[in-house]
Image: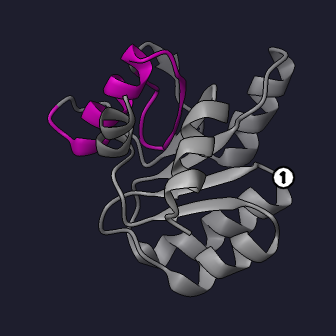
Amino acid sequence: MNEPETIRAILDQTKTIAVVGLSDDDSRPSYGVARYMQQHGYRIVPVNPQIVSALGETAYASLDDACRACKGKGNAIDLVNVFRAPAFVPEIVKDVMRLKIPALWLQEGVCHEEAAEWAEHDGIKVVMDRCILKEHARAA
C-alpha cells in the first residue's frame, strides 16, 4: 500500500474513476480534485445519491449503479476514489471487492487499515491517506 510503484501503476492503468462522495459544489475538495483529474484525461463517474450530476457527468446513487451504467456504455470503472468519512470505508471496500474493481484510492484523511487490508488481500491495488491530485502532479 502507498508504494510508489503502486501509485504509478494506478495512475497509468486508470481511465475511468468513480468518485464516491463527489460534490457538485465547486468549493469542495472532491470537486476540485475530480475536475483536475478530468482535465488530465480521466473519465469521472460521480457516486453520490444527493446530486444529479457533477462535472458534466451523471451522478449515480451507488457503485452498483455506476458500474452498470459504465458497462452499458462499453467501459468499466478502473478506480474508486473515496471522499467519505472513514466510517463508510468498510462498506465501500466490500462493494469494490464484490464488483471486482481493480483499484481503490482513499483520499487524505480517509483511513481504515482493516478495510484496506481486506482489499489488498483480494488483489486490489490500494492507496490510502494520499491525495490523487498531488500524486498525479508529482508524477507528471
Q: Is residue 86 above or below residue 128?
A: below
| The residue positioned farthest toward the bottom in the image shown | 114
Horizontal and vertical percent for residue 67?
76, 36
On the rendered image, what quadrant is the C terminus found in? top left
User: What colour scheme does the image use?
Assistant: one colour
Q: Which residues are magenta?
A: 27-54
Query: Is 50 part of what is drawn in magenta?
Result: yes
Q: Is residue 50 above or below residue 5?
A: above
Please tell me in which quadrant of the rendered image residue 79 appears: top right
Horizontal and vertical percent for residue 50?
43, 42
Please tell me in which quadrant of the rendered image residue 114 appears: bottom right
> Can see residue 23?
no
| Drawn side of residue 46 relative to residue 72, left or right | left
Residue underneath mark 1? 100
* Identity of the residue drawn at 49% across and 64% down: 2
Q: Is residue 99 above or below residue 134?
A: below
Query: Is 4 part of what is drawn in magenta?
Result: no
The foreground one among 72 and 61 is 72
The foreground one among 108 and 31 is 108
* Identity of the residue drawn at 72% across and 57% down: 96
| The residue positioned farthest toward the left in the image shown | 27
* Identity of the residue drawn at 66% across and 67% down: 93
